[in-house]
Image (tube, coloured by chain):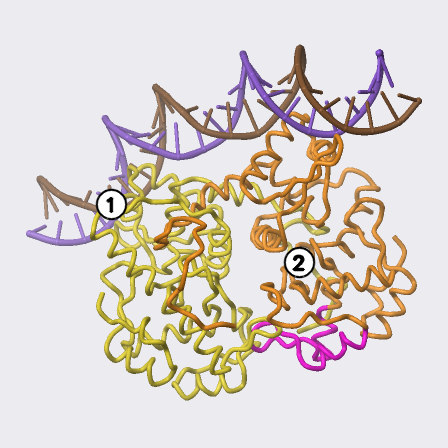
Chain colours: A orange, B yellow, C purple, D brown
Amino acid sequence: MPAEVTSGENDPVTSPDSYADSPDLASLAALLADRTRAAFCLALLDGRAWTATELARMAGVAPSTATSHLHQLVAGGLLVQERRGRHRYVRLAGPDTAEMIEGLAAHAPRRPAPVRSLTDARRRRDLAHARTCYDHLAGALGVAVTEAMTAREFLAWDYGPALTASGASWLRGLGIADDRPGTSRRPHVRTCLDWTERRPHLAGAVGAALFRHAMDASWLVRRGSTRILTLTDEGRDALRRHLPLPDEVLRTTG
Amino acid sequence: MPAEVTSGENDPVTSPDSYADSPDLASLAALLADRTRAAFCLALLDGRAWTATELARMAGVAPSTATSHLHQLVAGGLLVQERRGRHRYVRLAGPDTAEMIEGLAAHAPRRPAPVRSLTDARRRRDLAHARTCYDHLAGALGVAVTEAMTAREFLAWDYGPALTASGASWLRGLGIADDRPGTSRRPHVRTCLDWTERRPHLAGAVGAALFRHAMDASWLVRRGSTRILTLTDEGRDALRRHLPLPDEVLRTTG
DNA sequence: ACGTCACTTCGGCCGGCATCGAAGTGTCCC
DNA sequence: GGGACACTTCGATGCCGGCCGAAGTGACGT
């Protein structure tokens, strides 16, 4: 945490004399102000790379339309692309971009989408139960984990969300290497307002590490190529053992 | 922190059965995707109420245009209005709205605005030095305060920004009533990426309380009706005494 | 080599929306 | 009461941008 204040040599990313060029809020917001582009970004919030055609089908637009939108999103710095063969893979530019979009989405009004079928209803129920949120766990399960960690005083909220000392050692006990604080720019503990639960769940580097561990240990498995997560038997046992989670959220059946 | 997960009676704010209605990101972003509306919101980030005419003049549009935009922003929940006599005062709906806009602005590209005059250059320099950011202090001074509090270990960053015990007692020593944690929903320590410094400054309830104290104690005064803040002699002495701030940021001349 | 597939470019169409001026309503002050 | 002022409504204008289909390019597989 260097406390140098009289900024030394400025990185010439913009103008050499960088007094307050006002942020171009409108151009950034315009990128998200289209139904199709917004749908792309929300889909990409699962943290993985999608191809242009997949996104086009998901949003119900022609491939040429998707191309145009992806150009804009990449040019605007929200997405990065990777060309492999005849495929163009796009993903969110980084965790900070994901957090920005999440932050916006948390304040957005809900669109009342009518339930179309029984499958649709099931899909929604499962999505509300457990899903990925970029690089961490969301849904009722994510919120429950967060609140159980709070109950055991692994997380403290008094002065902003923070991991306690016992929380850090709990993580170490799980074999989760706690990234050394200060190493990365990213806040270690961050919260993210859950869409479905309307309560915060754990995010940031700690949330990502915990989720990575849960996937590595097969506590959770992805359902197909969606962002829906299914709790495995091992996962249920582990969460019951390591955290006293209420049984209601520990159902393992899709 | 109630850990009730199987949502009991739902508040009927949307549909009775509230599985995951996806957020309407596009409609929210569209509110900010217009140059004029974005300018309104950025101006309102100073936390005070403006009249429609003031905003119209600031943005360089006709009054009728401003009316239309303000309607949309109020209908969208970003702004609240208060009619007093023949004036219509609007302000940001709340701290969470301000935080959302700040978060977006921090990721927005800078618009290279050419310096038009000597007055303009001075205004920018002063704005970069100290200004309000909704309800707390921003600019080089805000960042310096934050970093000095970090150096004295009033703030800890290891597991997310947090106020330490000594930080809490330091605030009490200043006569700042530390809002009892848990009382309000708002995180007590939050950071906000500074536009000009590109480093975080203190925000959240603690940042707001500190700023309020600085204004009450006349450490800082507003310049006219702008968001520019000027450090007073008392303010310089106080900051030198309570925090070892580097002299460079302690200039009091506008 | 050929067909298939993923993606791109281009042109044209169309809807939505920001803008303004003019005219109207209510408020304040003299 | 009259005039100035803050704000609103309405209609007209014009532009920007999303959308598609058709045609083109390059990669992959048989």
| Front-most of residues B65 and B7 | B65
User: Which mark, by number, is residue A194?
Assistant: 2
SS label for mark 1 = loop
Q: The disc numbered 1 marks a residue on which chain? A: B
Residue A194 lies in what quarter of the image?
A: bottom right
SS label for mark 2 = loop
Is A170 within the magenta? yes
Q: Position of residue B152 (x, y in %)?
A: 47, 83
Q: Position of residue B219 (x, y in %)?
A: 29, 76
> Callout 1: 10 Å neighbours few (<14), some, many (20+)?
few
Q: Position of residue B227 (x, y in %)?
A: 31, 60
Q: Amino acid at mark 2?
A: Asp
Label 1, label 2: how far apart the Cα atoms are: 45 Å
Q: The disc numbered 2 marks a residue on which chain? A: A
User: Which mark, by number, is residue A225?
Assistant: none
- Disc 1 with disc 2 on a shared chain: no
- Per the rendered image, the range of residues in magenta is A146-174
> Callout 2: 10 Å neighbours few (<14), some, many (20+)?
many
Residue located beneath label 1 in the image: B116
Q: Position of residue B76 (x, y in %)?
A: 49, 47
Q: Residue at x 24, y 57 (%)?
A: B122
